[in-house]
Image (cartoon, grey):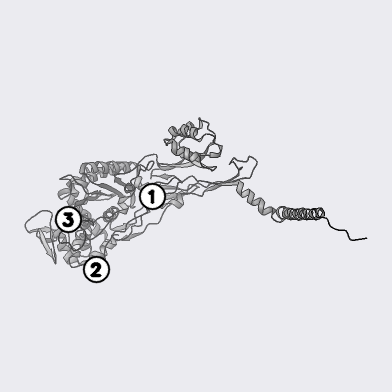
Amino acid sequence: MGRKRWRPQHIRLFFVGAVFLVAWIAIGAKLVLVQGVQAQTLENQALDQRLRSVTLEADRGTIFDRDGRELALTIEATTVYANPREISDPALTAASLSGLLGRAVGELQAQLEKDTSFVYVARKLLRDDADAIRQLDLDGIHFVAEPKRVYPSGDLAAQVLGFVGTDNGGLEGIEQFYEDVLAGEPGQLIFERSGRGRVIPQGEYEVSEAVRGQDLALTIDGELQFLAQQEALVTLEETGAKAVHIVVLDVTTFDVLAMASAPSFDPNDIGSDPDLFRNRAVTDTFEPGSTQKLITIAAAIEEGVVTPDRVLEVPDRIQVFDREYFDFSEHETRPMTVADIVARSSNVGTILIWQELGDPLLYRYLQGFGLGTYTGIDFPGEAPGLVRPAEEWCDSCGASTAIGYRVAVTPLQMTSVFATVANDGVWMQPQMVESIIEADGEAVGFDQQRQRVLSVETARVMRNMLTGVVEGGTGLLAQVPGYTIGGKTGTTEKFEADLVCPGAGSPGCYGDDVVASFIGIAPIDNPRLAIGVFVDSPSVERRRSGGVAAAPAFSRVMRFALHQLGVPPDAN
């Protein structure tokens, strides 16, 4: 037999068969790889594409005042979102929602036309607003519950409390400082959805519950805070000032009972002026002026340099190296006791005492009273102020420092100075949060730093001298009927960094604006409160001194506070 010859059609059939064989082998190998070797991996990848994870926000802890009133709390709100792939007519849907949400139709329509399965329409609506949208029964519009932070008393203690962002994270004030305590632990919701974004009813589903944040009890007295804010606003309007700050301290505990600033804001609707958010009683500094004379005189008495009845011959001006200092009003050289110098707020008399005290001792007492360092109050952004070391002082710097210049302090620091004198010479760390309230209801307090600055006797002597300021000196308008008050006025020129003064060697000089202040304590024999009123840049003529701009508000706040705390009037 001869050899069989391959015809062209046979060759074609052979190649076609070979191709099919190779294809089937490849398909089989792929099936083995997919259904065997890679089965679990591919199944997990497919599931990952269908799974959606949503973070469940934890309810934020409540913030209470010292009497248990809610200052900040969390309520259930409704967030509206859309699945654009389920919306057949984005223009009509946008038009239906526009009026209820107060948003432009075009803006909404652009969102609803996106190629995605999820877009936010509105975050954290109150019930009535959400129900109005539900009644429209729009395709592709969905609802989910979310916690919303609210402040039921509006602007009450706004700069103290601060506020939160859209996702409930603390952005200012106590809300920010205690974020880890208040925020709680978020939960997680995992569910399976189809390619069109619909939830698969029998699909994978898992939920881990959020853990609510802990509560805070503040030292703030809500009623006293309200009164202080009202008085700050009244003083702002009466004096034409840029801002007014009031600090109220319990001198036995250094609890902040009120801390008010005007102008203020509503944390429910914060607006767009970030300058209003700052708690300037803690974050901003100024030169204290005459209120700091308390430290200079107290240091001299504590060190035995002078006594209250020591008589000095006081002119109305004095030259100290390259600088000349003046008293507020011209007068002949006259004998003045140390008590008179305090009552009349004599710059020259205070400088005469400083000349005997010296820079090193003055610096030591400034530090002892907490100036130039953080008080440690539980609040973000606290300014430490500025007190330069004595060895860096120029020849006349001590004289300026003795009367309250060349030093930067916060309103809280200066109020704490007077609280220290009221507390028999013991400085304590101010606090704004009384306790953290844990899930089981247990209240956990805090340790306080404290240090003795003056002897009990020196503190008593200083309190008695401060009464002369109110009874016959520059603080007459600070009097409170039925109570003996001690305090000190201050009127300090403001250093303006952007001003250029004639003959100045460097930018910046003292301008026309002042900080007018009054800080006082009461009752003088058994002190309970220290209150500071600070008026930034009063512009109304005859209302620019501490005795006129700040003392009246002090009187009204102190009177209310003493009655609020049930402090009995003087026996006599």
In what element is the residue under mark 2? helix
- Residue 352: x %, y % from top left: 14, 63
Q: Nearer the viewer, residue 368 or 37?
A: 37
What type is the residue that disc 3 sits on? Answer: Val
Counting other residues with Cα less than 10 Å from the Cα at mark 2, is it few (<14), some (14-19), or many (20 or more)?
few
In what element is the residue under mark 3? helix
Horizontally, residue 378 falls left or right of residue 322, namely right
What's the residue at 33%, 41% (across, down)?
Answer: 223
Q: Within the image, what quadrant is residue 363 found in?
A: bottom left
Residue that lies at the very extreme toward the left in this rendered image: 332
The mark lying in front, picked from 2 and 3, is 2
Tell me if I can see residue 251 in this picture: no
Q: Within the image, what quadrant is residue 197 found in?
A: top right
N-term mark: 1 or 2: 1
What type is the residue that disc 1 sits on? Answer: Glu
In what element is the residue under mark 1? loop
What's the residue at 64%, 43% (across, down)?
Answer: 203
Quadrant location of the N terminus in the rendered image = bottom right
- Residue 68: x %, y % from top left: 41, 43
N-term mark: 3 or 1: 1
Horizontally, residue 123 falls left or right of residue 488, namely right
Tell me if I can see residue 22 in this picture: yes
N-term mark: 2 or 3: 3
Task: Look at mark 2 in the image and give the residue it sits on.
Answer: 392
Mark carried by residue 172 = 1
